[in-house]
């Protein structure tokens, strides 16, 4: 039977004045709404106890398996307010499907796509006053669905109890720079994920393992780290928290192929579809780190950008590495911004949704 996530209203919601204050300067991932969606799963019984309830801490036993073996997955998606006040989700079924894929890889239970969508929709309905009015900016309500092992047991095996939850946070741009070009640190010293690993699953462990390289990047004045395969062909993989594209002088987009180590980004997929509809060529293929570096030096690559739900599409100004700095031509980025605008116009209802991507809440 499908879950319905009935509402248990928060008796102490934030005042309208507090919501307005937060929405004026939301930052990224700092403030949370009045409610959260929850459901629990028990082996043999399936999913139950679904509700939209007041946002608040969990009470967890120190022996809970997630603290020890990181059996956890998550998603990131956004709700957008259109000019007429209506609120919409962008391709939420893609997140729901990836959640099923990630759960299978981490041996967590499958949450049916329909239940995932109901949880997100009902949470947004309950907290609709927290969906920002973009007013020329790019504010939205970021949804963070996640699932974790919820059994108190120290043996290493798949947990027989799991918790699913969705929280929501009003957000502005992910990078402090806004949509200005960012620098990227290239590393082949650390690996985010290897063949057969969890790279194509959205699990917390992938992000935890990226942090050391990310901090090395910060020390070099970079906002993100780009992982290069440490062995073999030394191909470009993805950034700590987003996918990457390079744009050739002829206007073709090149992005690493989904080889099992890379996250199937919803924004990545949307960019490929929109770019092709604009008549641009897109190559999903192995991209060598030296091909990228040499291509920038020779002028073969004239733009690069990173993309993800949180980051949307952010232009890259330069790649830095121990071998040197590879800067994209200053002032470039016309194709990046053209694709960015095409996608954000659909998300915010400024352009017709010819792909059928938007779901009204
Ligand atoms: C997202 O883009 O939604 C992510 O989960 C990535 C993270 C850097 C916030």
Image: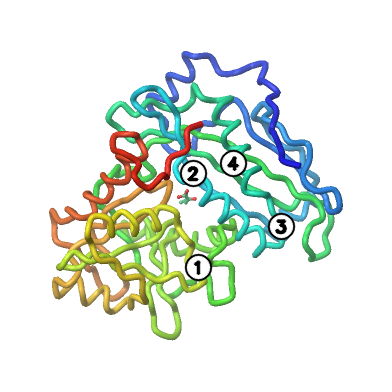
Task: Tell me the residue that label 1 is attached to.
Answer: 192
> Mark 4 or mark 3, which is nearer the start of the sequence?
3
Q: Answer left or right for 174 relative to 336.
A: right
Q: Secondary structure at mark 2?
A: strand
Label placed on residue 77: 2
Between the C-alphas of marks 2 and 1, the distance is 22 Å
Residue 19 point in image, percent of width and height: 48, 20
Q: Residue at x 59, y 72 (%)?
A: 197
- Look at 47% across and 72% down and name the residue there: 190
Counting from the top left corner in percent of width and height, residue 351 is at: 29, 38
Choose the circle earlier in sequence order: 2 or 1: 2
Q: Residues within 10 Å of mark 4 (few under 14, many from 20)?
A: some
Q: Which mark is residue 108?
A: 3
Q: Position of residue 26 (x, y in %)?
A: 42, 31
* Quadrant placement of the N terminus: top right
Disc 1 element? loop
Dot 1 or dot 3: first in sequence order is 3
């Amino acid at each position: 039977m499908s879950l319905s996530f009935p509402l248990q209203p928060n008796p102490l919601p934030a005042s309208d004045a507090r919501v307005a204050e937060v929405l004026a300067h939301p930052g990224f991932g700092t403030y949370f709404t009045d409610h959260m969606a929850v459901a629990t799963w028990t082996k043999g019984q399936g999913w139950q106890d679904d509700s939209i309830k007041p946002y608040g801490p969990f009470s967890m036993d120190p022996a809970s398996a997630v603290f020890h073996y990181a059996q956890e997955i998550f998603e990131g998606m956004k709700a957008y307010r259109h000019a007429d006040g209506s609120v919409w989700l962008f391709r939420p079924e893609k997140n729901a499907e990836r959640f099923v894929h990630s759960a299978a890889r981490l041996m967590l239970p499958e949450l049916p796509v329909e239940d995932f969508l109901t949880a997100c929709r009902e949470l947004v309905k309950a907290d609709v006053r927290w969906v920002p009015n973009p007013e020329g900016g790019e504010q939205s309500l970021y949804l963070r669905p996640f699932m974790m092992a919820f059994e108190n047991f120290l043996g290493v095996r798949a947990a027989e109890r799991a918790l699913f939850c969705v929280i929501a946070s009003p957000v502005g741009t992910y990078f402090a720079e806004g949509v200005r070009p960012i620098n990227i640190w290239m590393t082949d010293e650390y690996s985010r994920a290897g063949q057969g690993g969890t790279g194509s699953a959205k699990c917390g462990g992938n992000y935890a393992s990226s942090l050391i390289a990310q901090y090395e990047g910060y020390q070099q004045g970079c906002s993100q780290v780009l992982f290069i395969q440490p062995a073999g062909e030394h191909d470009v993989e993805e950034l700590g928290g987003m996918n990457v594209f390079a744009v050739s002088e002829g206007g073709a987009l090149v992005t690493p192929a989904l080889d099992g180590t890379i996250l199937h980004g919803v924004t990545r997929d949307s960019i490929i579809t929109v770019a092709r509809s604009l008549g641009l060529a897109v190559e999903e293929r192995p991209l060598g780190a030296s091909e990228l570096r040499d291509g920038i030096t020779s002028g073969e690559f004239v733009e690069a950008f990173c993309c993800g739900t949180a980051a949307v599409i952010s232009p890259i100004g330069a790649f830095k590495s121990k071998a040197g700095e590879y800067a994209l031509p200053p002032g470039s980025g016309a194709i990046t911004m053209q694709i960015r605008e095409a996608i954000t116009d659909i998300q915010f209802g400024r352009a017709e949704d010819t792909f059928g991507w938007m779901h009204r809440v």
